[in-house]
Image: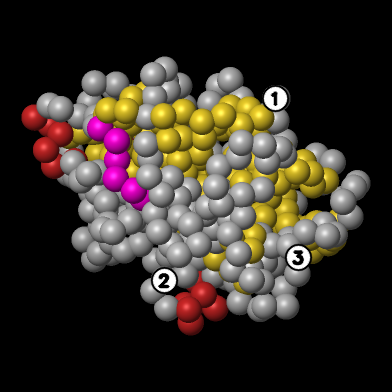
Amino acid sequence: MMKKISRYFIFTLFQKIYCQLIVPSQRYLHTVTLIDNKLYIIGGQYLTDISLETIGKEFICLDISIPFNTLELFWQNLTNINKVPPHIGAASAENGANLFLYGGISINDDEKDLIYMFDTRSNSWITINVIGETKKAFLTSVDYEGKMYLFGGKYKLNDKVSNDMLIFDTISLSLSSGSLINAPSMRFDYGAVLLPNQTIVYLGGSIINNEALPLNEVYLYDTIEDSWSVKTTSGYVPSRRSAFSAVLSLDNQKIIIFGGKGTTNFTALYELDITNFDWYIPKISGEIQNPRYWHKANVIGKYMVISFGCCYDRSIESDILLLDISNDYEYVWTTYFEPLLPSSLPGELPTQAAETSLQPNSPPDQGYADNTSI
């Protein structure tokens, strides 16, 4: 225990002395990308459209290679090397050391660039020119073997909702389309999770009038066969919702969803057993967290790491929530993060970045009570 405290103290001192730190703005509709033990966060707004001009430009990261407490977070400020216009509702993915950013809504309506890439080694932004495609926003990117699967979303120009499947190859820098046969209805702000068998599960979301969709059905996209199917769910089916987060459990047998919005805000956390598509409410201990939506979630080590969102009270709640999901029988809300493996302290931050452009190759238990909101 003393070793843990010592490591945390040394890192805290290092951060305060050497790193360019920032107290980031509260935000939602941002992106979060995990690359080489760092969470990169860019874009977003909060409550007013005016906030997009400043918050949407912020580029920050959190080092998760060392222990930290969510009550005292040390955010590294990368805004001075950000070349992406202020935006909301983009989708992101990683391939090796590269962060890819697709679509979104920019503060400048004339902004036509569809995809950006940030190289974390050279600290350079690259604009990837894709001809013939229109920007979409409020969609989730699922990345696998160098490909970004981008389903649905809203078109920026006419606010039309989509149900097409765009596939961006981050290696060849090319864009293609997936099958529409048996595809789900048009939607945005949905949840999406990649299973070990290379199938993507799509859950919930909103339609054109912002009505939340039910979760009594989920849609499966087979990335190998380029085909769609649907599954009916049962059990403690959550109420209609959108703008929630969805991740795969550590045993690869369950999908965990948190928060969201519909007719009300949602605190409840649910699990979908993908062996029988049965919903249930897991047992949870620790301080039950207040509602959030338009947040992001990543599984890092034994934690579900939830980042920012709307509309929590920042005076008493952290920008980062941690749910320990290592015990299948009881999840635990905690404020302390410990990485799986120790690592050395991070180096100094970059101070400048280059910007270039690329052309693609081609166009119920007692413990459930406080967690239930159905």
Q: Amino acid at mark 1?
A: Ile
Along the viewing direction, whichever of 198 and 350 lies nearer the viewer:
198
Return the residue at label 3: 113
Magenta segment: does it hold 238?
A: yes
Which region is colored magenta? 236-241
Q: Quadrant of the C terminus?
A: top left
Residue 254 found in image quarter: top left
Front of the two marks 3 and 1: 1
Residue at x-position 60% and y-position 64%:
160
Earlier-in-chain disc, 3 versus 2 = 2
Q: CA distance from mark 3 to mark 2?
A: 24 Å
* Label total for image: 3
Q: Tell me the tag on residue 46.
A: 2
- Looking at the image, tell me whether mark 3 or mark 1 is earlier in sequence order: 3
How far apart are the two marked residues, 3 and 1, measured between alpha carbons?
A: 29 Å
Q: Which residue is mark 1?
A: 224
265 or 341, nearer to the observer: 265
Residue 48 in the magenta stretch? The answer is no
